[in-house]
Image (spheres, grey):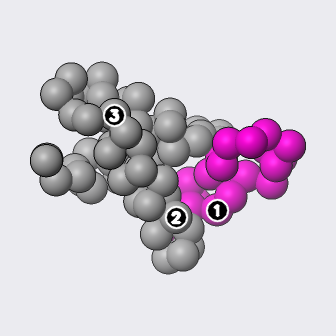
Amino acid sequence: MKTFDTQLAMSIVSHSTGGFSYDTLARALISKDKNENSDVLLESCRNFCLSLEEKGILRRCQRCSHSQDEYFEYIPH
């Protein structure tokens, strides 16, 4: 199993505008590396986004609360 590329994921997150879901992040990472296991990557992206939310780097997008997906917004520092 490959290790989760936190640098690439953070680069994608920090350049995002508006809300995004962790599966959007997973798709972006898959487009960079076709050999990644999508189920493992999806869970890794979810955990990554939740950890960034705990650190105050991301916040849950309240406008997207009607959706069953979890959407996040990057908080520029």
Residue 64 in the figure: left or right of residue 13: right
Tell which tag, 3 or 1, sits nearer the viewer: 3
Residue 37 in the figure: left or right of residue 74: left
Q: Is residue 66 above or below residue 56?
A: above
Q: Which residue is mark 2?
A: 50
State how far apart marks 2 and 1 are (Cα).
9 Å
Q: Are marks 3 and 2 in contact (CB under 8 Å)?
A: no
Q: Is residue 62 above or below residue 52?
A: above
Identify the element where label 3 is drawn.
Answer: helix
Residue extending furthest bottom?
55
Lower position in the chain sequence, tag 2 or tag 1? 2
State how far apart marks 3 and 1 are (Cα).
24 Å
In this view of the protein, can residue 24 be seen by the observer? yes
Q: Quadrant of residue 32?
A: top left
Q: Are marks 3 and 1 in contact (CB under 8 Å)?
A: no
Residue 77 in the figure: left or right of residue 4: right
In this view of the protein, can residue 76 be seen by the observer? no
Q: Which residue is mark 3?
A: 38
| Marker disc for residue 59 | 1
Q: Is residue 38 above or below residue 74?
A: above
Q: Which residues are magenta?
A: 57-76
Of the residues shown, which amino acid type is indicated by label 3? Ser
Lower position in the chain sequence, tag 3 or tag 1? 3
Of the residues shown, which amino acid type is indicated by label 1? Arg
